[in-house]
Amino acid sequence: MLHNKQEKRNDISIRVLQVTMITILLIITGRLIQLQIIEYETYGPLSLANSIRQESVSPARGIVYDRAGRMLVDNQPIYTITVTPANFDSKAIPLLSEYLDLDPKIIEERVQAARRYSWHRPTRLYSDISFHRFSQIQENIWKFPGIGYHVESKRHYPTDVNGSHIFGYLSEVTQQEYNSSRRYNLGDKAGRSGIEFVYEQDLRGELGSRYIRVNALGQSLGPFEDSQMGHSPVKGADIYTHIDYELQLLAEDLMKGKVGGVVALDPNSGAVLALVSSPDFDVDRLSGRIDMDYWLSLNADTTNPLFNRTISTMQPPGSTVKPLMGLMGLDFGIIDPNTVITCRGGFTLGRHYRCTRQHGRQNLVEAIQNSCNTYFFSLMNQTMKGVGLNAWHRHASSFGLGQLTGIDLPHERRGILPDSAYYNTHFGDSRFWGIGDLISVGVGQGTFSSSPMQMGLLAAQLANGGYRIRPHIVDRIVYPDGSYITQEYEKVRIPWVRDEHLKVVQEGMRKAVSEGSGRFYADIAGVEVAGKTGTAQNPHGIDHGWFISYAPYENPEIAIAVLVENAGFGSISAAPVAGLMMEQYFHGRILRNWVYNYVKTFTPRESDSNEEVL
Amino acid sequence: MAWYRQFDWLLIICWVLLFTAGLVAIYSATLGPVSQFLPDYIQKNFLNQVAWIGISIIALVAIQFTSPRTFQQISYALYIICIILAIATVIWGTEAGGAKRWLVIGGLRFQISEMLKLATILAVANYLTSRRDISTEHIGSALVAVVLMLIPSIIIILQNDTGTALILLAIIPVMLFWSGLPYGISLFLISPAIIAYFTVINWKLGVLATLVLSIAIFFIQKWPWLTSSAFIAGILVVIGVQVALYQVLKPHQQARIEAFVNPALDPQGAGWNVLQAKTAIGSGGLWGKGFLEGTQTQLRFLPEQWTDFIFPVIAEEFGFIGAGFLLLVFAVLLLRLLNIAGEHRHPFAQLVIVGVTMTFFAHLVINLGSAMGLFPVIGLPLPFVSYGGSAFLSYSIMLAICLNFDFYKREFSIYS
């Protein structure tokens, strides 16, 4: 009986337990059906969204070529370590600092900065690490939750041409730029000077997007292939410049250690063949990860290497303006080619303005050839009396003096070509101004100031028959789809220039090189060079040397302006630079090695500019 | 009858199917494409598990040749030894993942709590067998049995291993129930767990569950004192759980419960595990993504995917077909074990088999419930499937003892 009761009880217990277990297992099965069958539509996409992220892809920046199609600026891969703060574990910092060879404090700071940007998006932690370190971190990436990497590109300069003031440097976009433009990812770089700045919109290209697989640690596992989503970035446009590689290379070499600027133009189009501002900076060191020490040293340098002297410096042009003075005098009818002025060593009007020596009777050709100050003091005096300062100003302006040349480089300055308004503004309150302030302007001194680019333009326009041209570095912009824009500018005849007047001035410039002060260094074999030296008085130290020139005398192909600051006479400092460049341009090599050695070892000499303005 | 005809091959097949599924999932979770994100020592898990399965087969064979009476004879001694070792673990144990579970003796790591489960089941079964029927008149025996199970529970809680303690607490009412505890009292014993579960979701549901259970107890037993104490106890559980939730529990436990109630609240934090596990299971769909193709698994979105969250790995890569089959195998195993218990004549064997069945069942429910968001996340392995050598061995020993009782059920009877 007892036994039966026990058995009955056992049977019931088994039934109860079985029913309970089956019920609970059915509930679990029901939940499984709910999750896997009914809510599959919810969780399927969720798991995709989990592992697939949209990523913005920066485009490859456009490439810069010289006139012969030689690559001057291209892109190079750099390896960057990123951090996604939400997944990052601060405990990994010591190990990470060991792998990156970086102070843990710096890493901590950067992670903090990344947090301020976004918790869930990868931010650059360290750019431009060596491939060795990169591969070490890549192998051990599981030790660093939240740490990722990507390969970016930096500007690379494959040739020996530095071209810092042509190309310019880039730096990371600021938060404001990032916010205001859809064209950048944070950490992308934008051009800050040179053509990188001016043609930023073309070189930049357009952001693309792609879908990548990531793991739970936010590490990228490469593209998500099953998808046609996303779009490729549009590569930046390539830029073909007019830069002549050999000429640019030589000019940079010659200007090394000097302060000044060199501009070589095609007088027929305004194409810039070479442009050197010295001292320059190493563009390579400013690409990739910012070399802070170098950047600070550039900014602290008193010679200001970031300053583009070819377009931004303002120096008195000295005697290089004399050909233009003569041309204007002819047009104003104040002189004719046969007008003779006798030089007795100076010109007196209120005070004595000295010439370099007693030139005796000089016509215009001889005055240009010999750089006779007396002739141009007198001419300036008569011009002021005959037509006045403003008429003179208008005529000179039409050659681009005191004007922006419109070159495709940033931060150009117009210099000073004085007119009455200028004198009224600057002298009006303190004292009256008069002819006494203007005589020295006639020989490119006094308030007159201009840049090497403006003087190169003057030479080019005297050479090309009086056509106003616009200097420009870029020839054409070639877009990835093959279309292109050619940068061509109208050539406008300067209305008042007359060929017979120009002939006289050109003859004077030819003779200045063949027989005058340019004969030592600028008169090269095989090509007739025309030019004019200048020495600008510098009240703060040694005078600045100038030389403007063009060649061949008939049918000119190149115009060169050289400014060497604190170097004394233009004939011995600036003219040899132009002369060597002419040789390079026309002969493909330097013919006179002794001149090259002379320029390379040039040391400025003290000069008394009151005695000799060559 | 040939000896192999008396052997319960169905259980053996279930056992093999489960550890095979486990090996497949462990392989996928540690040696699949995911391995590039895992340290080397985790990538050794698969081979370790294979080795432990080998050891377990030896243990299974050895136990088969042991007399069933041996287990009854050694039960108290084993219980005391395990208790002492467990206390030693609390004092000298090695910490792993915030819990002191490992005792290192001579370079070997032992997880005593796994063995303690078996020892407790054996000891309680032995004690209850000696008391025979537990009815209202012998309620004192029931209390002794409860104390026998509470002691290891408390020690395990001191080891910070709440999950294992919950298993022991779940076994108490079932073993007492089997021993003849009146149905009403049995329901009364498990009612706190049910009430607590609903209270965690919402305290009003907890009160409702209290009312429903009290009425059910009244209809089963019709003892006013039991009904009223069930009601009072229920209300106390509701209040106690509320207090515990906000006062007693440690922040990480609170966060887990919070995440269970509302996983979307903190999807990057405590809700992460549940959300990712549910996503893995749900995105598996009917057919699954394929072996080594599960994105949640292979891209390391699942936490602890070779142990506590191994079920989502199977559900993701083999879909409802695979996960459902796994559930079916478990159901067959559990129901078959209950059947064996029912057919057996000896109360000790019955109690041990029921205790073991309940242990497996509780693990299964809590593990799957955690992964599917039915429970707050409680870290417990899925028996025979999850990675974990000493756990696998101890579950296999439990199963082997059941097989042994079944095999010798004629010789090992109440009359012998």
Image (cartoon, coloured by chain):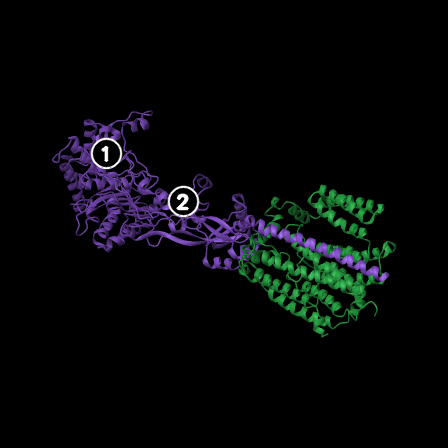
Residue ID for mark 1 = A396
Question: Which quarter of the picture shows residue A94?
Answer: bottom right
Residue depth check, mark 2 versus mark 1: number of the one nearer the observer: 2
Mark 1 chain: A
Instruction: Please name the color used to draw chain A.
Output: purple
Q: Compute the Cα span from label 2 to label 1.
A: 38 Å
Q: Position of residue B80 (x, y in %)?
A: 80, 63
Give the mark nearer the N terminus: 2 vs 1.
2
Residue ID for mark 2 = A190
Chain for colour green: B
Q: How many marks?
A: 2
User: In the image, is B352 to the left or to the right of A263?
Assistant: right
Which residue corresponds to the image point at 59% horizontal and 61% vertical from the top-left? Answer: B25
Q: Position of residue A575 (x, y in %)?
A: 24, 46
Mark 2 chain: A
Crowd around label 2: few <14 · some 14–19 · many ≥20 (10 Å): many
Q: Nearer the viewer, residue A419 or A140?
A: A140
Which residue corresponds to the image point at 71% horizontal and 75% vertical from the top-left? Answer: B2
